[in-house]
Amino acid sequence: MHMRTLHILGVGTFVCALVAAFTVAGHARQARTVADGVYSAAQAQRGAALSKAQCASCHGDMLEGVVGPMLAGDGFLQAWAGRTMTDLVDKIQNTMPLQAPGSLSRAQSIDIATYMLQASKLKPGQADLAAGALAQVTFAAAPRPAAAPAGGAGGVNLAPMANLAQLMRGVTFPNANIIFNVQVKDPGTTRPQQPVPFDYMLWGSTVYYGWQAVDQAAQALVETTPLFLLPGRRCENGRPVPVDRADYQKFTQDLVNVSREFYKLSQSRKQDAIVDQIERLNDACANCHKVYRDVGLAEGGGLGGDRCR
Ligand code: HEC
Ligand code: HEC
């Protein structure tokens, strides 16, 4: 199993290296930014019609963001800074519209992307943006918001990549669930599945399991919850995460504190110790969700337009 993991990672790295080499070569040929009149007005108009029909329900008529993120304006340009039009057109063609990904042609995806440039007040030029030119057109690196950390230790870039919902789904939710799961399964008696299943997720749970996994989930929550406060992150609907709000900061701090206590409870290796306190973890999530997540369009939750307000 170890060998197989290494092998697959190795192939991925090799492909990335090739792609990077091509991108660099393309740049040298004819580098332009999205502000250089790279599309025609007629093309953006075609894109606007497609967008109104297929995207506006989630992204808004003016691409201002509703339940999906804003797709125009400074916040949008900043979110895409440093990437190319290929990235944007791929994102559209491969993943949107959310309920029917893959249904748009390349040409349609490009047209819609140029409407995003127009809606961002970037001037058109004479010619359509062609498929072959996408890789040469970059979103200029926007100036960082003043409060954003320039880099962490060793100059590592700490700028956010995910929106808040993605961070919660990718990091907070799975780790919290490891702790919530102690209610239904005693980590002290949990043994790895035998034979080891051919499934990376299940195999992983045979390597770090039981109380060790609970310890690590609590540690992961302590270490990653402060990322809720990283400046520059947006919520899924495009609103900035309310990092300046005192109550939002307190809810974040509360989750860090509670997670620290759950680490101690896990160290006791007593299932009951966790079960007795589990409401406190639940409340640490719910207190913030009541104010900033489960508000707006759908009663009691769902993708609310008022999230993060
Ligand atoms: C049913 C709702 C829905 C519809 C319809 C929809 N989207 Fe989205 N879109 C989302 C959500 C939710 C996200 C955020 C999650 C993600 O990035 O995958 C998103 C993200 C995006 C992003 C990435 C934005 C960013 O800055 O990261 C782009 C670009 C996008 N959509 C384009 C489109 C286009 C173009 C259409 C129409 C062809 C469309 N979407 C239709 C819900 C929708
Ligand atoms: C400080 C506030 C805060 C705390 C604490 C918090 N959340 Fe969230 N959470 C939010 C907000 C706001 C959203 C909506 C983000 C968005 O739409 O981009 C969210 C979204 C989510 C989502 C995604 C929901 C969806 O739309 O699919 C999940 C899952 C989630 N949170 C889980 C958790 C869990 C589990 C905890 C506790 C261990 C937690 N959160 C603690 C504020 C918080």
Image: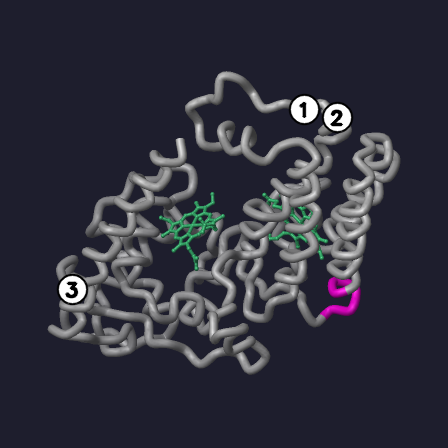
Tell me the crowding category of disc 2: few under 14, some 14 to 19, or many 20 or more residues within 10 angstroms, Cα based: some
Judging by the rendered image, the residue that carries numbered circle 1 is 190
Label of residue 87 in the image: none
Task: Indicate the secondary structure of the residue bearing disc 1.
Answer: loop
Q: What is the quadrant of the N terminus in the image? A: top left
Q: Main secondary structure of the magenta part?
A: helix
User: Which of pointers 3 and 1 indicates the residue nearer the eye?
Assistant: 1
**Tag 2: residue type?**
Asp
Q: Quarter-wise, where is residue 127 in the image?
A: bottom left
Q: Residue at point 26% right, 44% down?
A: 11
Is 133 or 280 nearer to us in this picture?
280
Judging by the rendered image, the residue that carries numbered circle 2 is 186
Q: Earlier in the sequence, mark 2 or mark 3?
A: 3
Dots 3, 1 in contact, CB < 8 A: no
Dots 2, 1 in contact, CB < 8 A: yes
Q: CA distance from mark 2 to mark 3?
A: 57 Å
Q: What is the quadrant of the C terminus in the image? A: bottom right
Task: Indicate the secondary structure of the residue bearing disc 3.
Answer: helix
Q: Earlier in the sequence, mark 3 or mark 1?
A: 3
| 248 part of magenta stretch | yes
**Over which residues does the magenta segment extend?**
245-249
Res. 178 in view: yes
Task: Indicate the secondary structure of the residue bearing disc 2.
Answer: loop
Q: CA distance from mark 2 to mark 1?
A: 6 Å
Judging by the rendered image, the residue that carries numbered circle 3 is 133
Q: Is residue 221 left or right of residue 90?
A: right
- Provide residue 66's location: percent of width, then percent of height: 53, 54
